[in-house]
Image: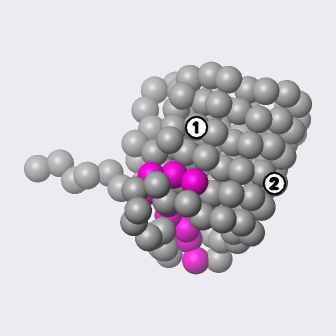
Amino acid sequence: MTTPKRRIGDLVSGPTTFVAAATKIVGKIVGQGPYVFCGTVEGDCDIDGTVTLAAGGLWKGSLRATDVVVAGTVDGDVIARRKVEVGTTGKVLGRLEGDSVAIARGAVIEGEVLVRSGREPTTFEEKRKR
């Protein structure tokens, strides 16, 4: 019997697009597949796939994707078509929306949290080592 994968990062497969910490992107981002942003983004995105904003990353604008993992700071709305996970170092200064929302102890959310499924947001303790 296969154990179901509960965390968004466990579900990601295929080649990932990485944006380095020293990189700054300004403008609209549209694409498919998993993305990991470690640097700064000023603009909006609509990604058909998983977007991870790494610890230390900064996003100014709306972040829309199939699934979203926030470990950095988002100054804008985070809208997932499916799941959103905000880690212990995550900070969202805007609306957080998804069918499923998980917020780690220590995360900061300064805005509305909307769970479209009608369930309560889930909280968790970060147990994975960085």
- Residue 24 is situated, as x and y percent measured from the top left of the image, at 88, 35
| Amino acid beneath label 2 | Asp
Q: Note whether 78 is above or below 26 in the view shown.
A: below
- Residue 3 is situated, as x and y percent measured from the top left of the image, at 22, 53
Q: Nearer the viewer, residue 84 or 89?
A: 84
Q: From the viewer's perspective, tell me whether residue 96 is left or right of residue 81.
A: right
Residue, disc 2: 75
Q: Chief secondary structure of the magenta span?
A: strand
The mark that comes first in sequence, 2 or 1, is 1
Numbered marks: total: 2
| Amino acid beneath label 1 | Ala
The residue range painted magenta reads 97-105
What is the CA distance from the residue labelled 2 to the residue labelled 1? 16 Å
- Decide if residue 128 is in sight here: no
- Residue 119 is situated, as x and y percent measured from the top left of the image, at 39, 66
Q: Are marks 2 and 1 in contact (CB under 8 Å)?
A: no
Q: Note whether 44 is above or below 117 in the view shown.
A: above
| Secondary structure at numbered mark 2 | strand
